[in-house]
Amino acid sequence: MSTGVTTLEAMASYAPERRVPIEDLVDRLGLRRTKLRLFQRVHGLKEIRFDPELSLFDVVLPAARSVVADEGTASRVRHVLYAHTTQAVTPAHIDPAREIRDRLGLHRAEAFGLSHQNCASGMAAVDVAGELLRAEGRPGDCALVVTGEQAFSPKIQLIEDVAVMGDAGAACLVTLDGAGDAVRSYATSTMGEFSAAMLLDEERSLRFSKVYAPELAKVMRRAVAGAGLEFTDIDLVVPHNVNLQSWRQTINELGIPREQVFLENVERFSHCFASDVFLNHTTLREAGRLVPGHHYLFATVGLGATFAAMVITHGASVTPAGTERDAGRKAA
C-alpha cells in the first residue's frame, strides 16, 4: 500500500446569491421572538443563503464543475464521494452521487455517498478518499469530494436553540503527494449515546450541551498533536459555522485567543451542513489570508454525535516522514 500524503489539490465553494435575513424566517420556522433574539444576539446569526427555486444539483454542481473544469484533471478522477448530512436528499430512484458523477462527465469514476457522520461527513470523505488512493497505489489519481445540500424543509432547517441551516456547496480534489494543502492529521470521535441527534430527549440534550465544548476541544488537541505541532503553531482554526456561543465555549475550553478562530462567516452564511469548513477555507483564500507553509485546523461537529478535526499545511506538501516541501503552487 502506498504511503503518500493526502493533499487537497484544489477547492471551491458555492452559495446561492439570495440572502435571507434570519428575521424573515420567523413564520417558516415557527420561531417565537425570544428564540429569534437568541439566534441574533447570542448565537450571532444575521442571514443565510437560501433559494427554494434552485434544485439540489444547482447548489452542488457549480463548485464541483470549477474543480474539474480542466480535461486533464477530470481524466484523473477515480472516485466521486458525495458527503451529505440529510439522509435522503433526492427521491429514492435517484442516486445523488452517481447523478453528480454523470453530470460532471466523470464516467470512469466510482461514485458513492457518505452521510452517517452528518455535518462531519465532509472531512470523513477527505480521509476516505486518501485511504482509497493509497490502497490503489496509482500515482496521479485523484478523488473528488463534493458537499452541499438544501434546507428544503423547516424540520431540517432549524436545530432547536442551536442553528439555522443555509444552502451551500463545496468540492475539493484529493490526491497523494500533490501540489496544494497537505493533510497532516485527522482526528475524530463519535459519542453514540447521542445518536438520536435532533430527536434527543431533554435529559440527553442537556448532557450533550455539557460535553460538546470539552469533547470538541479534546479532538482538536488530538489533531494538532497528531500533526506534531502545538496550538501556537496553528495560524487559524477554520471552523463550522454553527453559532458563536458554542465557539465561545470551545475557545474558553482550549484557552486560545478568539482571534485564532475564523468566525466571520457565521453571520454571513450560518451553518451549511457539511460544507462549512470548505466554504470558510475558500473565503480565507480569496481574501489572501492563507499563507503558504502555515498550518490551519479544520474543526466541525456532526449531530449524532461526531467530533472531527483536521490539520492542513497550506500550499506545501508533506512527505511521509513529515517534512515539508514546497508544492510549487497554491491550491486552486
Image (cartoon, rainbow, N blue to C red):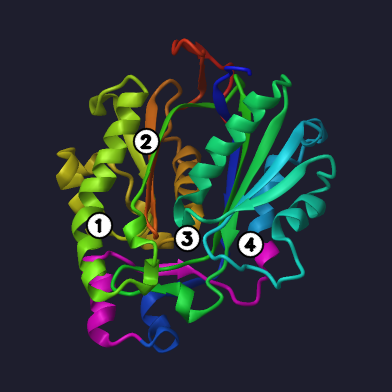
Q: CA distance from mark 3 to mark 2?
A: 18 Å
What span is colored magenta in the figure? 31-59
Q: As shown in the figure, which amino acid type bears the numbered disc 1?
A: Ser
Examine the rendered structure and indicate whether residue 176 appears above or below residue 167.
Answer: above
**Apparent side of residue 19 relative to residue 256 in the rendered image (left or right):** right
Q: Given this view, does label 4 or label 1 mark the residue nearer the observer?
A: 1
The residue at 70%/73% (across/down) is: 91
The residue wearing badge 4 is 59
- Residue 201 percent coordinates (x, y): 29, 74
The residue wearing badge 1 is 246
Q: Earlier in the sequence, mark 2 or mark 1?
A: 1
Q: CA distance from mark 1 to mark 3?
A: 16 Å
**Apparent side of residue 109 relative to residue 120 in the rendered image (left or right):** right
Examine the rendered structure and indicate whether residue 16 appears above or below residue 115.
Answer: below
The residue wearing badge 3 is 272
Q: CA distance from mark 2 to mark 1?
A: 17 Å
Badge 3 marks a residue whose secondary structure is: loop
Q: Given this view, does label 2 or label 4 mark the residue nearer the observer?
A: 2
The residue wearing badge 2 is 297
- Residue 39 percent coordinates (x, y): 28, 72
Q: As shown in the figure, which amino acid type bears the numbered disc 4?
A: Val
Q: Is residue 248 visible?
A: no
Direction front: furthest residue: 193
- Residue 59 percent coordinates (x, y): 63, 62
The residue at 83%/47% (across/down) is: 105
